Amino acid sequence: MTAVALPWGQAPRRAVTERPADERDLVLAAQRGERAAFSELVRRHQRRAYVVARSIVINHEDAEDAVQDGFLHAFKAIHRFLPDQAFGAWLHRIVANAALDVTRRRKVRDADELPETVASPFRDPAEGGELRRRLAEALETLPARQRSVIVLHDVEGYKHAEIGKLLDIPEGTARSDLHYARSHLRQVLGAVRSGL
Amino acid sequence: MTDELTGPALVRDDEVTNHLRAIVAPPAAESYWAGLERRILARIERGQDQGRWWALSERAYQVGLLAAGLTLVIAGSVFLRERALERRMAYESVIETPARSQQVFARRGLVPDRQATLRAVTDH
């Protein structure tokens, strides 16, 4: 941490057409306790954080909980973050851990509840589609890690190595998780397709 | 798309992927994200309050420890003073008794000083 960034309050001195303060400046300002800087980091990263969380948890509500938990942990730990590293990668790992915690809590909660009370997924624009409904169900039956890997890889375009870092698993494990997740979904959907 | 490993299960199924994308898609409405940002910041604020509460509690704990320490020191010194006083009184009670008897005998002029002392000691 050799460079000293301008405080957030001095940003208006820049020309209007200039790019907003870069992420490193924001991180340094947030580390000095400037709330506005951390708010900007939240604004910039919340969508991606949501995607990471949503790939791990079953429904939208849990994803939002995980995002909030993740940002809270990040806020508390920001003084330990090295500004020269990628803030996004650091944050996403925290959010992924928060999402895994939410999943664990939900497992315990669901074990105490009747099957009818299990939360249904958040909005589904084509809820009537049998295939999608069955896919959503099949997704819930996948182990959390396999679910995360298939969503992060196939939907979000993460590489195996990135997934490995994000979920703190070896790259080979991410690869095999993807294999099993695809096999499982294919099996489930094969039955639906043949029945349609 | 195929992956490095072979086998039909490792080939991405585009139809599945499209459905998956729809299932896990983040909300599109800007108002949702503005709301989420507010909720995140409010959560952090609450987290900070809890932190402050713990910090206050820690300060109170330190003050309590200091007060308890001071009380122990004061109580200890009072105890030592009391004990020293008691010892002194006990010592004086032993020393003073013959002295008083000696004085009584001497005052009465019945016996000389040395004899009065000897009598006072042997009387006890």
Image (cartoon, helix red, strand yellow):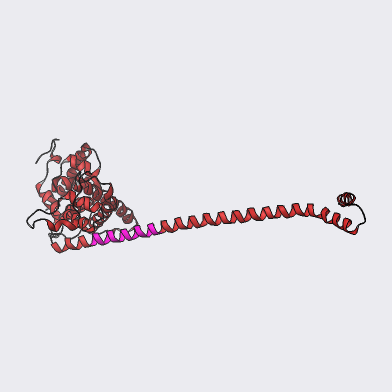
Secondary structure mostly seen in magenta is helix
Any part of residue A162 in sight: yes
Position in image of residue B58 (x %, y %): 41, 56
Position in image of residue A178 (x %, y %): 18, 42
Judge left or right: residue B62 versus residue A120.
Answer: right
Q: Looking at this view, is A51 or A20 the one in front?
A: A20
| Number of numbered markers | 0
Of all residues shown, which one is farthest toward the right?
B110
The magenta segment: B39-56
Any part of residue A42 in sight: no
The residue sitting at 23% across, 56% down in the picture is: A34
Q: Looking at this view, is A176 or A164 the one in front?
A: A164
Position in image of residue A126 (x %, y %): 12, 59
Q: Looking at this view, is A103 or A36 the one in front?
A: A36
Verify whether residue A82 appears in magenta.
no
Verify whether residue B45 appears in magenta.
yes
Q: Looking at this view, is B25 or A30 the one in front?
A: A30
Judge left or right: residue B56 versus residue A48.
Answer: right
Position in image of residue A56 (x %, y %): 23, 50
Judge left or right: residue B50 versus residue A67.
Answer: right
> Which of the image's four quarters has the N terminus of chain B?
top left
Of all residues shown, which one is farthest toward the top?
B5
